[in-house]
Image (cartoon, grey):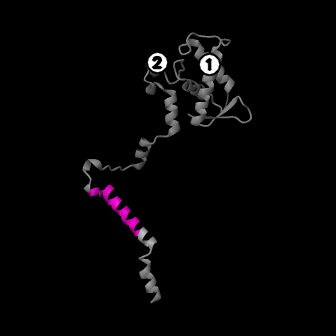
Amino acid sequence: TLMEMKRQNEGTTLIHNIKTDLADFIRNLLKQYLPLISSLQFSDIFIFKDLNHVITTLFPANFLQLSEDLVNPGYFLQCSCCSSVDSFSICDSLPDVSIIHKLISEHTTKKVDLNIIYHTYVSIVQTTGKRGGKAATLKDTATASYLIRFRRAVGELQHMGFIKRSKSKPDEISRLTWW
């Protein structure tokens, strides 16, 4: 009889009342905002047979998509000079990140020397001089702006996860992805 009295009293405690009130509140929310499938219109129902295809369509592989966008930036930039560039050629009108991405992708080794990439980058940017005004020599004030642009682009590639700085050599980077 004591156990029976305890069970009867459990239903009247404050915690039990809060639990039942919360459960009723959640049930009412689900009834109100989550209607039954039978009550939906046919145009609101989507059925997919291949879940992997849906996932790859909605969530593409990040590094593959990023590397494709860096190789062909003309699609997003909507400029005629970048969209007319072949995916293998490098020109001055491309963004700095795309130029350096293409230069790094030409190397077949995992470790890449930044000095070689920097001098190649400067020679590409100086040849036409479209973005920096007139073509300048290395001894000009343009050297500082080239170095700043180069460091910014390398930092962006590092932030995106394509490369990382070497701990032993400050002028060397390691490729983290192969594109």
Estimate how packed mark 1 is, as few (under 14), some (14 to 19) or many (20 or more) residues with alpha carbons within 10 Å: few
> Which of the two discs, 1 and 2, labels the residue nearer the N terminus?
2
Residue 49 x, y percent position in the rendering: 36, 50
Q: CA distance from mark 1 to mark 2?
A: 22 Å
What is the secondary structure assignment of the residue under circle 1?
A: helix
- For badge 2, the amino acid type reads Cys
Q: Quadrant of residue 123?
A: top right
Left/right placement of residue 137 relative to residue 80 reads right
Q: Total marks drawn?
A: 2
Q: Residue at (44%, 78%) from the top-left corner?
A: 10
The answer to whether one can see residue 142 in this image is yes
In the rendered image, residue 79 lying in the magenta stretch gets the answer: no
Q: Mostly what secondary structure, the magenta segment? A: helix
Camera-nearest label, 1 or 2 = 1
Mark linked to residue 145: 1
Report which residue position mark 2 lands on. 81
Examine the structure image and report whether residue 23 is included in the region drawn in magenta: yes
Q: Position of residue 178 (x, y in %)?
A: 58, 35
* Magenta stretch in the rendered image: 19-38
Image coordinates of residue 9 in percent, x first then y, are 43, 80
Residue 84 lies, with reference to residue 49, above or below; the image says: above
| Quadrant holding the C terminus | top right
Q: Residues within 10 Å of mark 2 (few under 14, many from 20)?
A: few
The amino acid sitting under disc 1 is Ser
